Image (tube, helix red, strand yellow):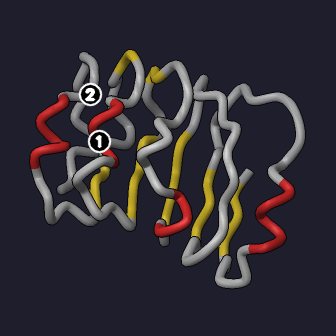
Amino acid sequence: MYFSDNFISRPIPYCFANYTQLKLLNLGDNNFSGSIPQELGKRTPLSELFLFMNNLVGSIPPHINLTKMEMFSVSYYLPIKFRVSGLLKHFTVRDNHFSGHVPKSLKNCISLVRVRL
């Protein structure tokens, strides 16, 4: 599902969690606000998640399994404290105001081909 570049200005709808076969979700370059719904990663086998250029706050819900992600892109004010490994090929946290260190677990991602900080 692609919803990028639409100037959507609201919280991310919980209904995305109802799509049990959802593998790619692109919500980038909108004005989504609030936090990432806890339900999003519970039933969806997401392998690609794009949340860049929004107004999100909070943290990444524990149910979004980054160890099964191939592409993950987030930016702006979303603080991230997580471990990455597994199939991750693209890791992007551009256009943000993060502070702190780059996650050490990135060195364990032997499949990484692109890191954008």
Residue appearing at x 78%, y 73% in the figure: 108
Identify which residue, 64 or 78, lies in the foreground.
Answer: 64
Residue appearing at x 33%, y 61% in the figure: 46
Q: Amino acid at mark 2?
A: Ile
Residue under pointer 1: 40
Circles 2 and 1 in contact, beta carbons < 8 Å: yes
Q: Which mark is residue 12?
A: 2
For residue 25, above or below residue 70: above
- Outermost residue on the bottom side: it is 111
Nearer the N terminus, badge 2 or badge 1?
Answer: 2
Residue appearing at x 47%, y 34% in the figure: 53
Within the image, what quadrant is residue 91 found in? bottom right
Q: Which quarter of the figure is the N terminus placed in?
A: bottom left
Position of 27 compared to 16: left or right? right
Position of 115 compared to 8: left or right? right
> Within 10 angstroms of label 1, few (less than 14), some, or many (20 or more) residues?
many
Give the x, y percent position of residue 13: 18, 28
